[in-house]
Amino acid sequence: MSASQPTNASTTSGEPPLKRAIGPKLLILFVIGDILGTGIYATTGKVAGKVGGALWLPFLIGFVVAMLTAASYVELVGKYPKAAGAALYAQKAFKVPFLTFVIAFMVMCSGLSSASAAALAFSGDYLGEFTDAVPPTLVAILFVLALAAINLRGVAESVKANVVLTLVELSGLVVILSIGAYAVFAGGGEPSRLTDLETGGTGYALMTGVLGATALGFFAFVGFEDSVNMAEETQDPARTFPRAIFIGVTVTGTIYVLVALVSSLLVDSRTLEGSSGPLLEVVKAGGVDFPPKLFALIALFAVTNSALINIMMASRLCYGMANERILPRAMGSVLARRRTPWAGIVFVTVLAVGLVSTGEIEGLGDTTSFLLLCVFAVVNIAVLVLRKDRVDHAHFRTPTALPVLGAITSLILASPLADRAADVYIRAGILLLIGIGLWAVNKAVMSAQKKA
């Protein structure tokens, strides 16, 4: 069957197809829940440390960049509704197997670094409101293992858990916005902070400072790209995805900018920077009698949701790559009864435990952003290249200017202009070297199979 005729995975392997359990409303909540979470709950303070009181600016720029790339993903997932996501698009556009593997590996690692950042956020200041008796790293590792168990249980169970957690984390952000509204009407806060840009200079230094804050803040927007890896488990993906992704990015982007405004209004940037639970500082400073422990509990649910969805994404990506023969077919093994990709889940869980054991929240968050910005640049170029590839079903088509701008902005934010810490590039480089090693092993295995 040609590339223009999307197939179910069962036609290319002996494994049963994934269950189409996700409808339109569930997918919208999935996208919102995937974007919301660790980024806004845990890294807002670090963004404030880079840019100062004008905390809303990086989130506004990030919103625009995310929407540009989201439009490209919407076109491509409607055109090719399969689980491999960016790796599939790169292969169809450029037909360079090595590039395809690198893109797939970078996407997978971005999900794992995001999930690992969430796990560490879970074990930080928010959990500290209740107990500090258990070592944070041990808590984070147990947390990852628990999410793997939920993922093995089934996609319906995982996505339903996502719906509950999404509603909980939304309630936490509503609390923040309500506190901000109260402060404004009561004449509280410090409005003058909202225009303070504390980037350590003017001109070039100002530009790189804002770009650096935007690059880190962009971590809060990643997630919409994960949803395309659920295409084989979504009902009528060509019609469902455009509305779900655009609504998801718009809702979360609006909330983020408003939360950033409230955070800067009520708490100075240095206090925010020093906390791994910055929104908890906003609750405490808001002048509203809202229990800090209750908000901390909500935040724990929020970061749990981020980690759950990223583990789901990475495991589905392994499944998709295995069926595209980018990874050995064994990585596409599915539990016959639960119809979940168990081999992929186990593989990504092991890698996530390794990242949790060696990283920290800000570095892992920035690594996630860097990896995905590189991928987004390729995806935006791919959507233009694939315009020549016609398919026999209707799908969304984005205006040409959007992927062009998406590629340019993604490359700028991924470049050294973003004033990114050296350890982020080192971590990403090590991950890429691991990927190249896996590529070599996979080629050797496939070569041996051909000779057999």
Image (tube, helix red, strand yellow):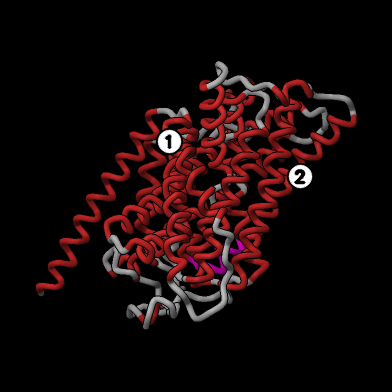
Q: In the image, which disc is placed on residue 278?
A: none
Pick out the residue farthest to the left: 451
In percent of width and height, residue 113 lies at: 43, 44
148 falls in the magenta region: no
Camera-side residue of 133 and 95: 95
Residue 438 visible to the viewer: yes
In this rendering, which labeled residue sits more in front, label 1 or label 2?
A: 1
**Label 2 near label 1: C-beta < 8 Å?**
no
158 falls in the magenta region: yes
For label 2, the residue is 174
Badge 1 amino acid: Ser
Camera-side residue of 223 and 394: 394
Range covered by the magenta-colored residues:
153-161
For label 1, the residue is 415
| Disc 2, SS | helix
Give the residue displayed 52% in from the left and 54% down from the top.
403
Q: Quadrant of residue 28?
A: bottom right
Give the residue displayed 65% in from the left and 64% down from the top.
243
